[in-house]
Image (tube, rainbow, N blue to C red):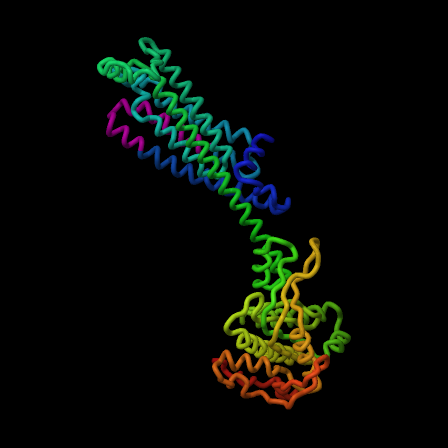
Amino acid sequence: MRLWQQWHDLICGKGQDCLPDPASERLSAAIREEEYEALRLTLGLRLGVCAIVGTILTLEMGWPLALNYYGYLGAFAFSAYVQMLLRRPGLDRGWMHWLFPFIDMALLTGAIVLPNPFDPNPLPPPMQLGFDTILYVALFVVLSALGQSARTVLYTTLAAIVTWTAGTLYIAMQPGVTLGAKMDNIVGMPVYERMAYLLDPWNVRLGEFLPRLVLIGMIGILLAVAVMRSRHLIARQVESERARRNLSRHFSPHIAEHLEQMDDAVGQVKSLEAVVLFADLVGFTQIADDHTPEQTVTILREVHQRLGRAVHENSGTLDKYLGDGIMASFGTPKSGPRDASAALLAARAMLREMDQLNRQRALLRQVPLHLAVGVHYGPLTLGNIGDESRVEFALIGETVNVAHRLEQMTRSLNAQLCLSQAFVDKLVEETRGDVGAVRDMVTLKPQPIRGLRDRMVLWILPRQPLGSEADAPEPAPTIH
């Protein structure tokens, strides 16, 4: 067992064994199911092959010579059926992996080397080894790879070598048979003597026997390596998908893909210009006080789901959940040609989602939820913070602070959406001067922003009166 594992690791490296125990067990169970499905496939293939071979033998050899082989063909089919019954998941045992290959190879070798009792004029026994019958042995070795088990392939190869050797020795011991040992010097023989040696029907030539066994062994080893590599590839793919899935639980798909490609835990720091969006529920503290913890969490889950969907559907990165709000970015970790347009589409989608949610809540006589969104465009520093044991992907810079301030200022400005002039400039640049996307918004004179020295021109979407929220919202301007 240890030798097998060392050989496996030498060829493939660590594959399935590098998975966590539950994942490794699930993968092993899935592979066992596939091995069993391969047995069912093999049964069907054997039945078809037996029918074809039986027909060919009947046409070629005639009756009753072909009758001798019907029993072998039936035994082949019955062996596959028994394997399918015994090697079910949960019943499969290690000894079955070597016993049945030896049974199959013994049947095949017996059909080739044993005399046909229905043949009144049998050919010299060594001629049974010279009709390309070794190809049937190779075929069985190749078919064993369907089970996706390297051990089964190796056992089948070993069984082929052992049974073919035994069959050859059986023929060599028959009366009148000679065992040719001239393996190296036949080239130096006179031509007529060489022809007589090669064409002697009563001679078993080691020069043909040993290369055939070597060929069968090489085919088996190569197939076993191919099967091990394929299973190792499956294990690595499972591990990769598991890691990606775990990353996706904590990071946006864009960030998860970026993290997956990094070689070190902390990674490199990157500077770029991107859009940052903050969205937050207004007055949610009071709402939480009026509901049970379970009801509060249910509301948050619904809101987070809707906001996250708006971000993802517009190619944004959901950076983090902030209690009753979110922080998202557009153009991270790689800038795109339509980052500002995508951010505005996401912001308006969030407001529509909240309108729909409030209409549902109104039917249940529940208080409406008000969303505040702030968006800014500017330079960012992007990278991991933390250490080797735990990292957090973070956006750092004044742009993040300004976007957060704009979201907070919506309360005093009685707005549901607040955009910075830098963001609108970027939007106009992307749309080639088209300002139709913000035609329903109001431009404010330069406003003071906490933490900034200079004032900033803001664009706001005024909050609708409470009574009009149940009405159908006006379609948002189109972004070209």
Does the image show residue 120? no
Q: Give how far across and how far down residue 473 sits, in percent.
A: 56, 84
The structure residue drawn at horizontal position 60% and vertical position 83%, both measured from the top left corner, is: 421
Q: Give how far across and how far down residue 95 sits, in percent.
A: 54, 29
Asked which quadrant contains residue 169, the reply is top left
Q: Is residue 399 above or below residue 165?
A: below
Q: Is residue 318 above or below residue 472?
A: above
Report the magenta stretch's main SS: helix
Seen in the image, is 43 located left or right of residue 377?
left
Q: Give how far across and how far down residue 353 sits, in percent.
A: 59, 76
Q: Give how far across and how far down residue 466 sits, in percent.
A: 66, 87
Which stretch did the figure color magenta? Answer: 53-82
Name of the residue lying farthest toward the right: 289
Seen in the image, is 366 located left or right of residue 11?
right
Observer-nearest of 118 and 255:
255
Observer-nearest of 143 and 33:
143
Seen in the image, is 45 located left or right of residue 36?
left
Q: Is 411 one of the magenta-colored residues?
A: no
Observer-nearest of 394 and 438:
394
Name of the residue lying farthest toward the top: 175
Observer-nearest of 277 and 125:
277
Q: Is 62 one of the magenta-colored residues?
A: yes
Name of the residue lying farthest toward the bottom: 445
Seen in the image, is 355 located left or right of residue 220?
right
- Name the image quarter holding the N terminus: top right
Does the image show residue 465? yes
Figure disc tally = 0
